[in-house]
Image (cartoon, grey):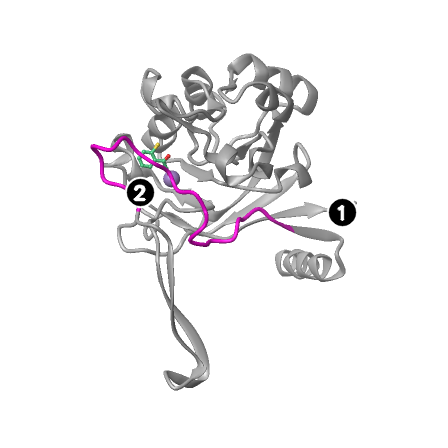
């Protein structure tokens, strides 16, 4: 049928390279920095990869590990249940979210110049409107990915922790409310630790990306990389979190399909 031909054409285009598959994921390792919350709160467990056997007496023909990690570690996905504003929504966990939400187009907003000047740079509605004047209105059910080139920093600058918390770029409250309510985005993605800015705990409402996205049943992606390899529009994101029972999120492989033509 027509549909199956389109799907087979896509598979052929991926095989031939006419459609590039761009990996937007950091390697999940014990060295990767994880979010540090104020000391009075529970903290993410460190990533641990413990070898069970490696073709030796513990397992002569096989290599495998036990892996421990927090749901919000490395390049990872946030489900609506992660935030109190999404706690009562239907199908709000990674194991109950609709599979169709795992594939959607993306708009990439390049703020790398601004973020290079100011680690506390905030995306605003006027900046997105200026982007739309150039690239067209953000369609419904798209990811909006904030390119800051933060993923190119060394670990210390990547976390950019000071005594008053992290200083990393992100969205202001107005733009998050606007993206969700006026543009119907499926989610918001960042290169930094967290979809929110490092100082977002002081915003109103606190952590506005989490607040508005998950309150509307939408999703977050964070610690992305290689956003500089994506076009402003036209990429399709595949983001399928682990099917953790009642999970609030999970590390995952995020890939983007990009037409080479
Ligand atoms: O979703 C996250 O990884 C994240 O940024 C976060 C996690 C837990 C608590 C607060 C925040 S703000
Ligand atoms: Mn998260």
- In the image, residue 240 sits, relative to residue 67, either above or below, namely above
- Whether the residue carrying mark 2 lies under 8 Å from ligand 2 is answered with no
Q: Which residues are magenta?
A: 22-44
Q: Reply yes or no: does residue 35 show up in magenta.
A: yes
Instruction: Tell me if 91 is positioned left or right of 140 in this view.
Output: left
Residue 115, position as x, y percentages in the image: 57, 23
- Tell me if mark 2 has few (under 14), some (14-19) or many (20+) residues whose alpha carbon lies within 10 angstroms of its own: many
Residue placed most toward the observer, 202 or 156: 156
Residues tagged 2 and 1 counted as in contact (Cβ below 8 A): no
Q: In the picture, residue 181 is in which quadrant?
A: top left
Residue placed most toward the observer, 44 or 206: 44
Quadrant in the picture for the C terminus:
top right
Residue 105, position as x, y percentages in the image: 58, 40
- Tell me if mark 1 has few (under 14), some (14-19) or many (20+) residues whose alpha carbon lies within 10 angstroms of its own: few
Query: Which residue is at a point 64% across and 22% down the rendered structure image?
Result: 113
Residue 260's disc is 1
- Secondary structure, mark 2, is loop
- In the image, residue 156 sits, relative to residue 51, either above or below, namely above
- In the image, residue 181 sits, relative to residue 260, either above or below, namely above
- Whether the residue carrying mark 1 lies under 8 Å from ligand 2 is answered with no
Residue 253, position as x, y percentages in the image: 50, 53
């Amino acid at each position: 049928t027509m549909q199956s031909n389109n799907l087979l054409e896509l598979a052929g285009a991926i095989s031939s390279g006419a459609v590039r598959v761009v990996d937007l994921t950091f390697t999940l390792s014990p060295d990767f920095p994880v979010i540090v919350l104020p000391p009075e709160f529970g903290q993410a467990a460190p990533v641990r990869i413990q070898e069970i056997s490696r073709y030796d007496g513990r397992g002569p023909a096989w290599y495998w590990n036990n892996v421990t990690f927090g749901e919000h570690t490395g390049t990872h996905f946030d489900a609506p249940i992660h935030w109190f504003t999404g706690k009562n929504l239907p199908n709000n966990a990674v194991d109950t979210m609709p599979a169709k939400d795992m594939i959607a187009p993306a708009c990439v907003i390049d703020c790398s110049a601004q973020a290079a000047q100011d680690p506390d740079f905030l995306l605003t509605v006027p900046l997105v409107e200026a982007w739309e004047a150039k690239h067209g209105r953000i369609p419904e059910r798209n990811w909006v990915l904030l390119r800051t080139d933060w993923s190119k920093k060394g670990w210390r600058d990547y976390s950019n922790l000071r005594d008053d918390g992290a200083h990393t770029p992100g969205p202001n409250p107005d733009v998050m409310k606007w993206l969700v309510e006026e543009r119907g985005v499926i989610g918001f993605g960042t290169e930094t630790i967290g979809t929110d800015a490092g100082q977002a705990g002081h915003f109103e409402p606190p952590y506005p990306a989490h607040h508005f996205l998950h309150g509307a049943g939408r999703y977050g992606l964070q610690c992305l990389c290689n956003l500089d390899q994506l076009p402003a529009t036209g990429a399709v994101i595949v983001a399928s979190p682990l099917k953790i029972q009642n999970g609030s999120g999970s590390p995952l492989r995020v890939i983007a399909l990009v037409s080479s033509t």
